[in-house]
Image (cartoon, rainbow, N blue to C red):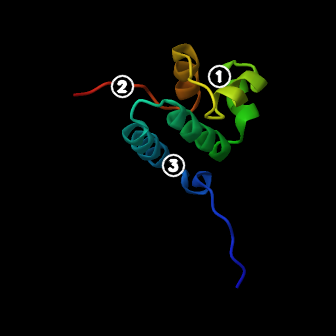
Amino acid sequence: MPVREHGASDYLKTPEDIVAYLNAAIEEMGDDPRLLMKAFRNVAEAQGGVSALAREAKLDRVALSRALSGQRNPRLDTLAKVSAACGVKLRFST
């Protein structure tokens, strides 16, 4: 039986899956928000790709791709637009 490679986006089928995945990324990221942006890339792939997310978020596709690469620290306005386009809300709790 051939082995098939799986990506995180293969498992992000429902809004609940996406929220749980992003919450886990926030828990794991510590002081490095680039991990969260990589998680958002996986969500984007599950929802039709970075180009579709860029259209929904009204962001430049190339700039969004760079932001989701995990190589740069995200800007707060980018994070807010991306989360809204993915259908999730940013929240704080204690």
The residue type indicated by label 1 comes to Ala
Q: CA distance from mark 1 to mark 3?
A: 20 Å
- Image position, residue 9 (x, y; %): 61, 51
Q: Residue furthest top?
A: 77
Task: Say left or right for 24 vs 60.
Answer: left
Q: Residue at x 56, y 17 (%)?
A: 75
- Image position, residue 65 (x, y; %): 71, 30
Mark 1 nearby-residue class (10 Å; few <14, some 14–19, many ≥20): many
Q: Nearer the viewer, residue 70 or 51?
A: 70
Label 1 sits on residue: 57
Q: Earlier in the sequence, mark 3 or mark 2?
A: 3
The residue type indicated by label 3 comes to Thr
The relative height of residue 3 versus residue 24 in the rendered view (above or below) is below
Q: Earlier in the sequence, mark 1 or mark 2?
A: 1
Q: Nearer the viewer, residue 7 or 15?
A: 7
Q: CA distance from mark 3 to mark 2?
A: 19 Å
Q: Nearer the viewer, residue 19 or 4?
A: 4
Q: CA distance from mark 1 to mark 2?
A: 19 Å
Label 3 sits on residue: 14
Q: Earlier in the sequence, mark 1 or mark 3?
A: 3
Label 2 sits on residue: 91
Q: Residue at x 40, y 40 (%)?
A: 23
